[in-house]
Amino acid sequence: MDLSSLSRAVVSAALATTLCSAPALAESPAPVAATAPAARSLPAAQKKPAPTQDGQAQAARPEIEVVFVLDTTGSMGGLLAGAKQKIFSIASRIAQGRPTPHLKVGLVAYRDVGDDYVTRRFDLTDDLDTVFANLRRFEAGGGGDTPEHVGRGLGEAVSKLSWSKDRAVMKAIFLVGDAPPAERNDDWNFKHWARRAREQHIVVNTVRCGGDDETAKAWQFVAKLTDGTFDTIDQRGGMVAVATPYDAELAKVNAALASRTLYAGRAEAQAENRARADAVASLAPEAAAERISYMKKTRGSTAGAGAAAPSSAPKAVGGAVDLLESPSALAGVRDDELPTELQGLSKEARVEKVKQLSDEKKALEAKAAKLAGEREAWLSKNGTEKEDAFDANVMKGVKAQALKHGVTY
């Protein structure tokens, strides 16, 4: 038994988000051996506090890992569109747990042999802007017949993503589709990978879209085997927008914060980050508001009293650095890797420009934090939930399993 796995400290969300970058799109022809179950350890909420760099202890945060395994054939267009709008809402609601959990999300899309692809996957990450960018790449297409290669989608989720080996970490899959598993005489048998999920202590929650009986049988099998939940929803996902009086203003603040970035680095890295920022800036009002709420809950969960409002700007990926997040990095940036806004300026003028934009950003962050708090208070009094919707079913599964890991809602 590897004793080091029992003493591993939970990494804070603020550090983890700076280390994440968008995982590469992958298609894999063969499985890898499943990892043996890790030794039993204390629930995350009972672990000893992790020391910070200044020697002070901070409360350990429970960890939650969630992977969405999604049928992306043509009939699933409505659900995919809704999921893209609701991903920040789902994450924000998961972050409402007490203690505030450290959330990682992964994605696996599946179709069938003969379609444009059989599977596409993105590894677990705690950068929700990266998750959103990856989810946007999923489009409904192909299909037109049943069954689909569900076994490969589930199998890759179980065997090819970087799940924690710590038993204290909550690990859950949400399998969502409208067609039963295909038998393709390959290494991706559906029931085999259902059993592997159980062996690795991964709970599989299943959401059937529509009313196919064979799909229900398969979904109920894996849910029962892994102690997950089974639910049926409308083919389109049943998700509805929840408007609040604060959404429009939060959407404006979200767009302004996405533009308050100064990405330095290689030209291609700058372009990638600007595209991510543009996508965040263009979010619909509800999604933008939920994104801000999520960022304030998670990035600010370890901040002490009186600390500045945590950053809600998209984190830099691909080797770039946001000079508003790390102004001290400016001195080491080569002239040909400066953002456009700083090119042609003297060194003194560059420093002044960074300071000006940083001050503007701090004011926006404070405004965002205030609005997010007011929105949460409004929702607690006036919000309603559509119980047969995809997002409600996700939270139903999360709440049931999180309680076993010391997280309450």
Image (tube, grey):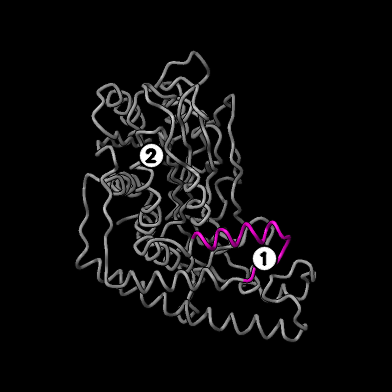
> Is residue 367 shown above or below 236?
below
On the picture, is 256 further left or further right than 231? right
For the C terminus, which image quadrant? Answer: bottom left
Q: Residues within 10 Å of mark 1 (few under 14, many from 20)?
A: many
Amino acid identity at mark 1: Val
Q: Which mark is residue 174?
A: 2
User: Across the whole image, how many numbered discs are drawn on residues?
Assistant: 2
Judge by depth and name the residue closer to the eye, 38 or 180.
180
Q: Residue at x 51, y 43 (%)?
A: 166
User: Which mark identifies residue 321?
Assistant: 1
Which of the 4 image quadrants contains residue 358? bottom right
Left or right of residue 134: residue 24:
right
Task: Tell me the magenta residue range.
Answer: 262-279
Q: Position of residue 17 (x, y in %)?
A: 56, 59
| Helix, strand or loop for the magenta stretch, by majority | helix
* Secondary structure of residue under mark 1: strand
Q: CA distance from mark 1 to mark 2?
A: 34 Å
At label 2, the amino acid type is Phe
Locate residue 292, reporting x and y percent: 42, 67
Q: What is the x, y in percent for residue 330?
A: 73, 74
Q: Is residue 87 above or below residue 68?
A: below
